[in-house]
Image (cartoon, rainbow, N blue to C red):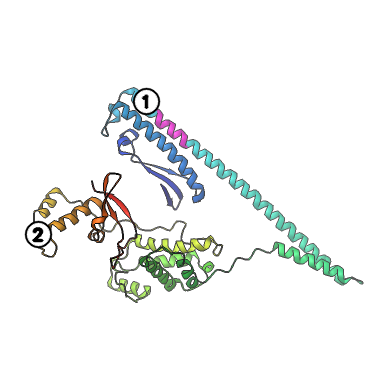
Amino acid sequence: MLIRLTSGYHFRRRVPNAIRNILGKKEIWHSLGTTNRHNAKPYACEIYASSERLFRSVSNVLEELKENESCVREELPTEVRELFDLLIATYQQEIANLQKKYEHQKIKHSIEMLEISQKAEQAINGGNKALNLLEKTAKQLKTAKSPTSSAIIGLQSQIDEVKALLKPKEAKPSPLFSEAIQTFLDTKTKAKSTVIHAYQATFKRFLEVCGDKPLRDYTGEDVGLFKSMMEQLPETYGKQRNDKRTIQQFVALAKKQNLPRVSGKSVKNHFTKLSGLFKYFLLRDLVDKNIFTGGWQFDNKPKTKRVRWSDSDLQKITGQPWQFGVISHKTASMIVGIASYTGMRLEEICRLREQDITEIQDIPCILVQDHPALKNQPWTQWSARLRTH
């Protein structure tokens, strides 16, 4: 798994339970030493291949020894421990070789870019010298006693050509944010109306904070201001569909009443939507960079600490008499059972139909899918297969 931190990209992979005692760790984590995703992906793929070889080698040895997941490394024979040490050392050497390989590539790339930059600078300096010489010659011709108009015109033409060559390429004019919104949303042809509304709500809040400007004029300062305002919203934000208040009014209310704020995950979701818009126009050279990427940090710690039910608590709940007549005890029990096993949402469970229970490759499954006859559809547009055993 690629993970983007402020320091750059990192590779993280979970160690299988069966070999954690052997390797002495729960996960593998390596810094890739780059902030460029294009360079990080092949590096991560090679580390993944090396870690896969290590996992398989250790698993094969354990399988031959017929050891279970609870084996203790110190209790294994000496020659087996030495074999594991050799496998781990081989993996560490492979990682060290990969690190040197990609460091050399980075150095080589940096040298090549430096050479290109130096050549470009030399060309610009040479062009400026030639331009100065041409302008100086033009002045001398104009002050001469018998200058020919054709000579002056030809020289002026050369000056104009050199100026055009040295002039930096003008960037394409970028559209106003308000205009870019519709262009971007028009590409979401398969998105549900709820998804489109979520995008529109995010874009509306960004306009309220930063105003309507050409996309290229927005800076990291605008993004920082937007992030600061979004983090001050009350956690009830977005619960009322027809609420017309502005983001400034929401923030003022939250400060006045000292209300709990939205989670960092919610703010990050808004950034993801805006990042998608800027990425769309970045690929079309209408913005210089995606200002919503590059190390923005969010507080993703869960606000609610979830505690597992104890066996005694579950027995008390299940032992209580059913007091609700609208829904039968059997139906409620089935809903709770399906939710506990599959993790499905209550709305998705209540919309299940007989045709959603099927067999795929002789395995009983539940299909979570939309039904055209329903007036309202589940919030998430997805189709999944869940095993029922």
Q: Is residue 289 above or below residue 54?
A: below
Q: Position of residue 27 (x, y in %)?
A: 36, 41
Residue occupied by mark 2: 322
> Residue at point 11% right, 51% down?
315
The foreground one among 247 and 66 is 66
Residue occupied by mark 1: 82
- Res 33 seen here: no
> Residue at point 49% right, 39% down?
99
- Res 99 seen here: yes
Disc 2 is placed on an element classified as loop
> Residue at point 37% right, 35% down?
55
Tell me the magenta residue range: 86-95
Q: Residues within 10 Å of mark 1 (few under 14, many from 20)?
A: few
Furthest-left residue in this view: 321
Q: Position of residue 198 (x, y in %)?
A: 37, 67
Q: Residues within 10 Å of mark 2 (few under 14, many from 20)?
A: few
- Structural distance between the alpha carbons of marks 2 and 1: 61 Å
- Amino acid identity at mark 2: Trp
Q: Position of residue 267 (x, y in %)?
A: 37, 63
Q: In the rendered view, does 373 fall on the left or right side of 127?
A: left
- Amino acid identity at mark 1: Glu
